[in-house]
């Protein structure tokens, strides 16, 4: 996959190894805070996460004028020291804003890119598996029909289990789940329609579509638990489990975003001459870090607002699923295995 090649390039850069390691360490501290909440640990997260945030913000501003790779390593040390000082001076105003707007803006940006790259993961994973099955010339028809039926059955089975599970939760949550599943059903029906129209016209069958449906269902459930957990599922014993699950998904998306951005270096430099690849990557990292560290800061957010946040992320994801899903189905071409000597 392209993002793996991009990640290899990222891990060759000591700066990004430091940022990724710090991002993961911040999450470990957050998980520890869920198990053993204390003022000292909470303050440590704000200082460590805040210094990382300011460090990346300063690099982001510098990237407009200078190539990050050309900077001396001691300059990074100086920037980080300055970031620590800024954290002590400004962390109250950044992580405890008087207006929710300061949190909603990065949250919305984070939602947008998270939804887009989540769609990319679902689509890329399903098409890669389908391409692998397509290479087996003798059995490609059977294996891909089985692929279509198997993942279609799993999708329906998990939907049934989901409805049963949420039937034991408060009515408002059950209604939200049913509405989300209804929306996904009609989106899936629309994409299936495109698949069968393409089959009739081109004689090419997008068998991966049911696996794509299954992966998007998993992501929709993640949205439910990630954004509505605090309202309907939060318990003292359950919080650490939620934090660990959220960390694993967030870390996967974080690495996927970096890998995808750096796998398209030439394209970005050609199309976006003003913005450098480092500038885009650092901007996305800033949004991720701020939302991440803000998880430990108590916020008085109305239940309706949390539901709206979950609905917003789901709506963005559905938009990408429908619009780019149709494009991906039409444009997808199987990667045929090259014959030896050709």
Image (spheres, rainbow, N blue to C red):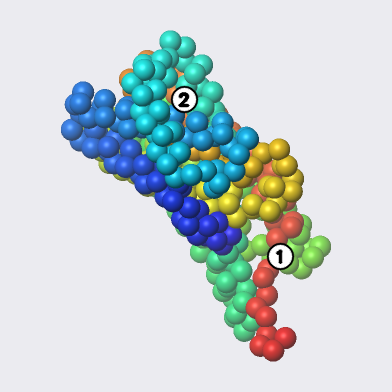
State the residue at coordinates (47%, 21%): 103
Element carrying mark 2: helix
Q: In this view, does 237 lie to the left or right of 66?
A: left
- Residue drawn at x 68%, y 68% is 334
Query: Which-is-in-front pick, marks 2 and 1?
Result: 1
Using residue 204 as the reference point, say whether residue 92 is left or right of it: left
Q: Can residue 259 be seen in this view?
A: yes
Residue at image coords 66%, 62% = 206
Disc 1: which residue? 333
Callout 2 touching callout 1 (CB < 8 Å) = no
Q: Is residue 303 above or below residue 41?
A: above
Real-space Cα distance between discs 2 and 1?
39 Å
Q: Where is residue 308 in the image (x, y as percent from the top left)?
A: 51, 24
Towards the viewer: 332 or 290:
290
Residue 280 in picture, x, y percent from top left? 59, 40
Q: Residue 257: horizontal and vertical position, in percent?
A: 53, 47
Give the residue pinned by disc 2: 307
Dividing the picture into quadrants, the one containing residue 316 is: top right
Residue at x-position 55% and y-position 46%: 70
Q: Residues within 10 Å of mark 1 (few under 14, many from 20)?
A: few
């Amino acid at each position: 996959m392209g993002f793996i090649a991009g990640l290899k390039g990222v891990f060759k850069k000591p700066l990004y190894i430091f940022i990724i390691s710090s991002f993961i360490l911040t999450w470990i501290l957050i998980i520890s805070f869920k198990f053993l909440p204390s003022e000292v640990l909470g303050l440590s997260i704000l200082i460590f996460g805040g210094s990382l945030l300011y460090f990346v913000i300063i690099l982001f501003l510098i990237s407009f004028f200078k190539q990050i790779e050309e900077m001396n390593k001691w300059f990074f040390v100086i920037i980080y020291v300055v970031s620590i000082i800024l954290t002590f001076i400004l962390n109250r105003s950044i992580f405890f804003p008087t207006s929710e707007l300061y949190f909603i803006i990065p949250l919305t940006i984070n939602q947008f890119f998270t939804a887009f790259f989540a769609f990319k993961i679902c689509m890329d994973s399903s098409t890669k598996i389908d391409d692998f099955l397509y290479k087996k010339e003798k059995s490609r028809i059977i294996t891909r029909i089985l692929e279509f039926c198997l993942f279609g059955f799993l999708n329906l089975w998990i939907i049934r289990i989901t409805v049963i599970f949420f039937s034991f939760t408060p009515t408002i949550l059950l209604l939200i789940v049913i509405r989300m599943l209804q929306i996904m059903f009609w989106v899936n029906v629309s994409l299936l329609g495109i698949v069968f129209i393409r089959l009739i016209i081109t004689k090419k069958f997008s068998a991966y579509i049911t696996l794509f449906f299954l992966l998007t269902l998993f992501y929709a459930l993640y949205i439910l638990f990630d954004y509505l957990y605090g309202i309907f599922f939060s318990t003292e014993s359950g919080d650490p489990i939620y934090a660990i699950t959220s960390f694993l998904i967030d870390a996967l998306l974080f690495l996927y975003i970096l890998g995808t951005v750096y796998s398209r270096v030439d394209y970005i430099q050609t199309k976006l001459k003003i913005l450098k690849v480092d500038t885009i990557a650092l901007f996305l990292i800033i949004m991720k870090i701020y939302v991440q560290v803000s998880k430990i800061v108590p916020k008085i957010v109305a239940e309706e607002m949390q539901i709206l946040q979950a609905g917003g992320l789901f709506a963005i994801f559905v938009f990408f699923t429908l619009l780019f899903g149709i494009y991906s189905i039409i444009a997808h071409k199987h990667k045929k295995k090259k014959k030896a000597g050709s």
